[in-house]
Image (cartoon, grey):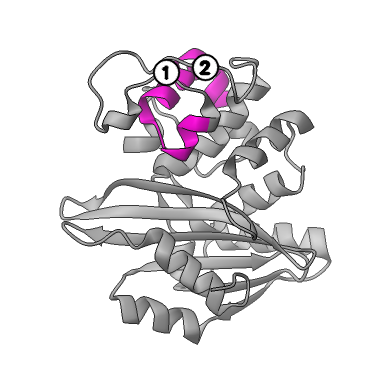
Amino acid sequence: MSKLLATCLLLSASLHGHAAEWKESPQLAQLFQQKGVTGTLVVHDVSADVYTVHDRARAQTRFIPASTYKIPNTLIGLATGTVASVDTILPYGGKPTARPEWAHDMSLRDAIKISNVPVYQGLARRIGMAAMQANLRKLNYGNMDPGVEVDTFWLKGPLKISALEQTAFLERLAQDRLPYPKAAMAAVRDITRQAGAADLHAKTGWCNGPTKEVDLGWWVGWINKDGKLYSFALNIDIPDGAADQRVALGKAALTSLGLLQE
């Protein structure tokens, strides 16, 4: 058993009075196979402490978080007072951007919707390395290692986090159980809520994968369904030229588990 899994199970046992239950899901495996996708998905039924997973070993493997880090980055920015609110307009920096829609000053509310990298890099520089490092430890976020570049560590490393660790962080955010002001947590929940009838909160991420030929894609979040909380984290390999299936696959998986409606 890995140290990560042992730690998570001990934490779960202390919180729930029993060891977490793990279920390898044939229906999830079939979905991944049908799409021809290599990756993992873990869904945690928080109240029952049951993990439904495809590829448990990969769920415990750490990868660069990419733009899923915009969730803790927002929280840290608010909690440190670096930004007054998610509606404060922040500069994008004026340099050429990878996507034209990023080349505008905007609020975090708008920036997170289009995953505006320059705006969030500017926020990280304002937060500063010392505060960022301290807050990564406070959050117990992945390997908690920002390295030496305050505005690239979640895009290029060395920061890494597993799908299992993502679910633990996100469900604490969803439940107001992080050591941060409730107003800050509420603001982050507000801007991560997805359009539609379901109470679904999510964020994508995309970065260079373990090889030059394969990128890594994330879709993480949580959903409230019938008074119960479910956190989830998906990461997949995206070969060069392959279609982006992160959100479609994730939603299909949640639908197959009865957590979303088609």
Query: For mark 2, does the 10 Å Cα neighbourhood hold few (<14), some (14 to 19), or many (20 or more) residues?
Result: some
Q: Amino acid at mark 2?
A: Ile
Query: For mark 1, does the 10 Å Cα neighbourhood hold few (<14), some (14 to 19), or many (20 or more) residues?
Result: some
Looking at the picture, does residue 89 appear above or below residue 193?
above
Residue 46 lies in what quarter of the image? bottom right
Identify the residue under disc 1.
105
State the image coordinates of residue 85 (x, y, percent, origin top left). Answer: 64, 21
State the image coordinates of residue 221 (x, y, percent, origin top left). Answer: 57, 53
N-term mark: 2 or 1 = 2
Dominant SS of magenta comes to helix
Residue 256 lies in what quarter of the image? bottom right
The answer to whether residue 230 is left or right of residue 107 is right
Q: Are marks 2 and 1 in contact (CB under 8 Å)?
A: yes
Give the quarter of the figure containing the N terminus: bottom right
Q: Looking at the image, can residue 14 be seen?
A: yes
- Give, as a single range, the part of the protein colored magenta: 110-134
Most extreme residue toward the front is 196
Q: Magenta span has 119?
A: yes
Q: Which disc is residue 34 wearing? A: none
Identify the residue under disc 2.
89
Residue at x 34% of width, y 28% of height: 102
Residue 184 lies in what quarter of the image? top right
Number of numbered markers: 2
Rounded to the nearest angstrom, the CA distance separating label 2 from label 1 is: 6 Å
Of residue 192 and residue 47, the one placed in the foreground of this image is: 192
State the image coordinates of residue 195 (x, y, percent, origin top left). Answer: 57, 51
Please tell me whether mark 2 sits on a helix, a strand or a loop: loop
Q: Magenta span has 253?
A: no
Q: Amino acid at mark 1?
A: Asp
Looking at the picture, does residue 215 appear above or below residue 47?
above
The answer to whether residue 178 is left or right of residue 157 is right
Residue at x 41% of width, y 65% of height: 248
